[in-house]
Image (cartoon, grey):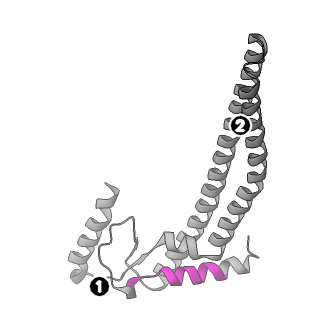
Amino acid sequence: MKRLIAPIMLVFALIAAPAFAEVKVGYVDLQKALNLSESGKAAKEKIANSVKNYEGTIQVRQEEIKKLKDELEKQSMALSADARSAKERDYQQKLKEFQRFTKDIQEELQQKDADFTRQIIEDLLKIVQDIGASEGMSMVFEKSESSVLYADKSADLTDKVIERYNAQFKKQGGK
């Protein structure tokens, strides 16, 4: 439904244009702006650093689990049924803890990424609105979400948005 609204509004605006005034339309590739803006790059770097920090811990825990499994396999014939059962429970418990730990890390990193993305997109949208208003745009579409099938490059405001956003980002001390 969302994909239909923008094209319908565009058609309406183009039909009604002769009755009103010149219709100026632009579009922005928010994904490109997000990826190429200074704060977008900084956010990616923060996430990458968090991943690196966790990789060491994950590797140590993986090695512990592998060691437990190897011990269990080597000693399983020599151990009594109770001892083997206790070692198997210990191994299963450590494996569950490891899986829970990695899942928690993954969720934490996804949440951080979503928070960074949300804040940057909010800031980008304010800049798009400012550019749209200052340049007398009737409408500004998001390139991938509004089903823009064709648009002249002169209607692309993405680079302008990135430039203004980066200037604002530097003024604020890089957040």
Q: Residue at x 59, y 62 (%)?
A: 117
On screen, residue 6 versus residue 120, left or right, reads left
Query: Which residue is situated farthest in the bottom direction here?
Result: 154
Prevailing SS of the magenta stretch = helix
Q: Residue at x 73, y 38 (%)?
A: 66
Q: Considering the image in quadrants, where does the N terminus appear?
A: bottom left
On screen, residue 149 versus residue 97, left or right, reads left
Residue 21's tag is: 1
In the rendered image, residue 19, in percent from the top left (x then y), is placed at: 22, 81
- Which residue is nearer to you in this view: 17 or 34? 34
In the rendered image, residue 97, in percent from the top left (x then y), is placed at: 72, 33
Asked if residue 158 is positioned above or below residue 121 in the image, the reply reads below
Q: Considering the image in quadrants, where does the C terminus appear?
A: bottom right
- To which quarter of the image does residue 63 belong? top right
Q: Residues within 10 Å of mark 2 (few under 14, many from 20)?
A: some
Residue 98's tag is: 2
* Residue at mark 2 to residue at mark 1: CA–CA distance: 64 Å
Asked if residue 71 is positioned above or below residue 112 in the image, the reply reads above
Inspect the magenta stretch and tell me whether residue 108 lies in it: no
- To which quarter of the image does residue 46 belong? bottom right
Residues at circles 2 and 1 in contact by the CB criterion of under 8 Å: no
**Element type at marker 2?**
helix
Whichever of callouts 2 and 1 sits on the residue coming sooner in the sequence is: 1
**Element type at marker 1?**
loop
In the rendered image, residue 32, in percent from the top left (x then y), is placed at: 51, 73
Inspect the magenta stretch and tell me whether residue 159 lies in it: yes
In this rendering, which labeled residue sits more in front, label 2 or label 1? 2
Q: Residues within 10 Å of mark 1 (few under 14, many from 20)?
A: few
Q: Callout 1, which amino acid?
A: Ala
On screen, residue 100 versus residue 141, left or right, reads right
Q: Which residues are magenta?
A: 155-167
Q: Callout 2, which amino acid?
A: Phe
